[in-house]
Image (cartoon, rainbow, N blue to C red):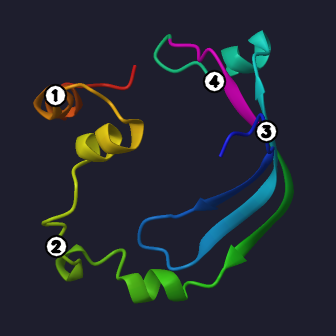
Amino acid sequence: MNVLENPHVALMFVIPQRREVVRVAGTAEVVMDPDLLQSMQVNNHVPDLALLVRVEEAFFHCGKSMIRSRMWQPDRWESVAGLPTYAQALKDHGKLSDPIDDLEERMAYNESDRLY
């Protein structure tokens, strides 16, 4: 959803090996405040934009979904065989004309890759 059209947002924080999740809801806006952005600097990289969320409610949520999903038990996960790759999903959803092999190559994860 576009926060410029509808600023209402909800976030769910999932912490590895914890059953409970934290749910946060509120309103969001895109900000470009230089001081705020500077405070978010990582490895000499300052973001161009930030999403500021004004929290209206925050609470712990029952862990039943984490338990039932076996989220933290990789040996119990269902196979993803037959599901589209991330590149294929982007190509389909974005109606991209790029060849799928090019998209897959650009999205390949390399151990030496870094966010910043």
CB atoms of marks 1 and 2 within 8 Å: no
Q: Residue 4, image x and y in percent? A: 77, 34
Residue to which mark 1 is pinned: 99
Q: CA distance from mark 3 to mark 4?
A: 25 Å
Q: Secondary structure at mark 3?
A: loop
Please report contact status of discs 2 and 4: CB closer than 8 Å, yes or no. Answer: no
Q: Residues within 10 Å of mark 1 (few under 14, many from 20)?
A: few
> Magenta span covers which residues?
45-52
Mark 3 surroundings within 10 Å by alpha-carbon count, few (fewer than 14), some (14 through 19), many (20 or more): few
Q: Report which residue position mark 3 lands on.
A: 5
Query: Mark on residue 83?
Result: none
Labels 1 and 3: the sequence-earlier one: 3
Mark 4: give few (<14), some (14-19) or many (20+) Cα within 10 Å.
some
Mark closer to the chain start, 3 or 4: 3
Which three-letter amino acid code belongs to the residue tagged 3? Answer: Glu
Q: What residue lies at 58% left-to-right and 60% top-to-bottom?
A: 13
SS category of the residue bearing label 1: loop
